[in-house]
Image (cartoon, rainbow, N blue to C red):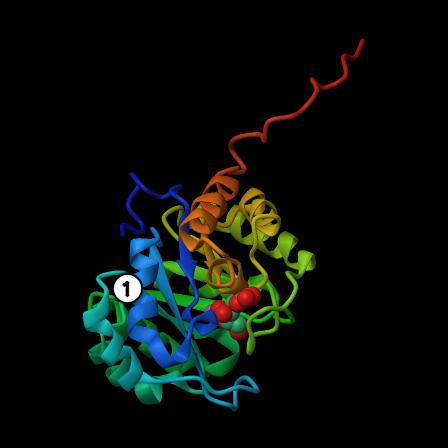
Amino acid sequence: MGYTTMHDMHEKLIAPSILAGDFARLGAEAARMERCGADWLHLDVMDGVFVPNLTFGPPVIAALRPHTSLFFDVHLMIQRPERYLDEFLAAGADGLTLHREACDEAGLRQTLRKIRAAGKRAALSVKPGTPGEALFPWLEELDMVLVMTVEPGFGGQAFLEGMLPKIGALRTEIARRAPGIRIQVDGGISAETIALAGLAGADCFVAGSAVFRAEDPAEAIRRLRNEADRSPWEAPETESPPPKTG
Ligand code: DX5
Ligand code: ZN
């Protein structure tokens, strides 16, 4: 699906995280998400070092590639991701998200440039404890920023409302300097929290439990998209008119 053109810059994207899927049937889960109307498929790579959990790497992503034509949004929660960059690109990733905390400055610049030179989308993320300003110097090198709304490592955690000002600050800076850049949020996204993130300025939403644990995932994705569509530029409908003054 489109990404940073002027035409679609405010289109909201829903990216189900396969971390919440059935790991014994990952290919079927990927294909199911496409049938359910997902915009992207979010793939969480964890190394047991950057985060206290392990998932999968390039061979699993390559094995999934024939099962769906969805955009593969690969979230690298690994220390020094440049070590495996070529493998992730070859595996069929469409977008790669690195963590600011996982890379040194020189390595990061080179890696972001390499991702874009390969025709893929480059994104940079911050954990809850890292300020959004840590991403400001990198905006020119990026197609997307990811604001973690939980501590990375596990699905099913509660959305951290304290991240909303960080999303807002990034939205303001991005509007000023690079309006095509998307803002993704990841962690605790549900039909309730997605509107908060959308109002703060996010336009790409990762959702694990909210989609995979739903009885009807297609309906869950539709509902998330509707709720997300309360963009900062459209005031949400109010039940009663605002009080008159004067
Ligand atoms: C957590 C991962 C998330 C996770 C989100 O470290 O990055 O993508 O799958 O899961 P939920 O939506 O259940 O919080
Ligand atoms: Zn993720």
x and y percentages locating residue 110 in the rendered image: 32, 78
Q: Nearer the viewer, residue 59 or 80?
A: 59
Q: Which of 95 and 57 is in front in this view?
A: 57
Q: In which quarter of the image is residue 63?
A: bottom left
Q: Which residue corresponds to mark 1? A: 31
x and y percentages locating residue 195 in the rendered image: 57, 44
Q: Residue at 53% across / 64% down in the picture?
A: 209
x and y percentages locating residue 108 in the rendered image: 39, 78
Is 23 placed above or below 167 here? below
Is 127 placed above or below 221 here? below
Q: Residue at 40% across / 58% down in the picture?
A: 15
Q: Residue at 29% across / 55% down in the picture?
A: 35
Q: In which quarter of the image is residue 34?
A: bottom left
x and y percentages locating residue 46 in the rendered image: 46, 83
As helix, strand or loop, the secondary structure at mark 1 comes to: helix
Q: How crowded is mark 1: few (under 14 residues within 10 Å), some or many (20 or more)?
A: some
